[in-house]
Image (cartoon, rainbow, N blue to C red):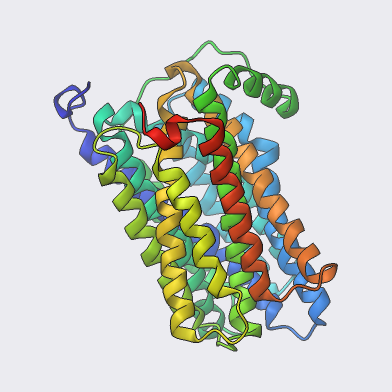
Amino acid sequence: MDSDLSHPGWRRGFWSLMATQFQTAFSDNALKNLIILIVLGSAVPQEERNTHVALAGALFAAPFILFSMLGGWLADRFSKQRVMTMVKLAEIGIMLFAAAALAWGHAALELAAIFLMGCHSAIFAPSKYGILPEILPHDRLSWGNGILELLTFLGIIFGIAASGLLAETFAGAQGLSGLILALLALLGWWLSRGITPVPAANPTCAPRINPVTDLWARLMSMKQDRDLWRANWGNAGFFFVAALVQMNLMIYAQDVLHLSKSKNAYLNLALALGIGFGSVAAGYASRGRIEYRLVPIGAVGLALCSIPMGMAGVGFTPFVLCLIGLGFAAGLFIVPIAAVLQHRPAPEDKGGVQGAANVLSFIGILAASGVQWISFQTLNLTPGQVFWVCGACALLTGAYSAISRGRFIRGEA
């Protein structure tokens, strides 16, 4: 087993990566949800409003399906640190474009900015996940994933919370919100330069242009490893549930709890605290190994916490407590799955595997946009009942992992 001594100087590069990832998750979600809040606050019919919310989620997810395999190839072909630095440089230009779109109040350009940020994150993700095993000692991989998931979801939730503050603070002058996000992108580029430089894992790999054929080849390769196969589908199921919860929470806060945009921060903070504690707890509970048993435990927790959230008349305090529990269970669920995706592939294939995992996870997110639309427009479900859908899907995902692979229950390595 590796030790800290076999990876000298890993701490500075690791924490630079963590800071860069936090800024990325924060800015992605601050921009996307700021535009959603602008739509929610506009004088449009409710049906059109809900369609726009689903469209924004779909536009952010689509690039992950189109370009994640390209991001995986770049992560294998070049230094992952170099790829991340160049992507963060591109983010500065994207945020300046977003600032102009927000200043003009042009809806089509605002949605285009969401799409471009999705492209940025699709290329960034395989390198950020693939580099962890290269800069961390093996016995710290689960711990590192716990920290990564903690900061990722904190970035997501605080980005959502910040979007409410930006929407209210700069009402009528949203170009300033875009400029703030552009400055944060500049900070993210500077932070990315501190990530540990690593050599290219597979500098001779041929370009992979067609995302469909490349994805199929990766899936057939991963199918030979049962743990890797299960982890990929568990990862996709998790992000489906997470996206559905995130989109539905914004509508629930406005339509059921009647909260202001800034007070949405209370709900987002509750979810962030839960995810943070759950991710860190999963990292420490793993004790230097991949603790498979946390996956079904997290799935059951997600399902149980969703039940009170869907009940009519649930009070604000019980709802918030359930959100914290939901986040805690989510942290337990995703940390071991992420560790499997990073640990099991061969070094020269880690980028490609992460690219394929991203495609599957964002197919899940895209599906969540469709399920949200169907839930409201066709099934006429209430926002609370949509949380029951989330819980049922989480339970099915956890059951698949546990029943089809006994070691998820027994905790075998």
Q: Which residue lies furthest to the top in this view?
A: 204
Q: Quadrant of residue 187?
A: bottom left
| Residue that protrudes farthest toward the left in the picture | 5
What residue do we see at 60% from left, 31% from top?
Answer: 356
Q: Who's the residue at 57% across and 52% down the image?
A: 395
The x and y percentages for residue 55 are: 75, 61
Q: Where is residue 160 in the image (x, y as percent from the top left)?
A: 51, 69
Up-down: is 80 above or below 43? above
Q: Residue at x 31, y 41 (%)?
A: 144
Q: In this view, does 105 lie to the left or right of 162?
A: right
Location of residue 148 in the rendering, given as x and y in whole percent from the top left corner: 37, 47
Of all residues, the one furthest to the right in this rendering is 378
Res 154 visible:
no
Indicate whether 324 appears above or below 299.
below
Question: Does residue 87 appear in the picture of this structure?
Answer: yes
Image height of 315 relative to 209, above or below? below
Q: Is residue 152 above or below residue 123?
A: below
Residue 394: % across, % down: 57, 52
Q: In which quarter of the image is the C terminus?
A: top left
In-image side of 80 versus 282 (left or right): right
Residue drawn at point x = 35 percent, y = 34 percent:
290
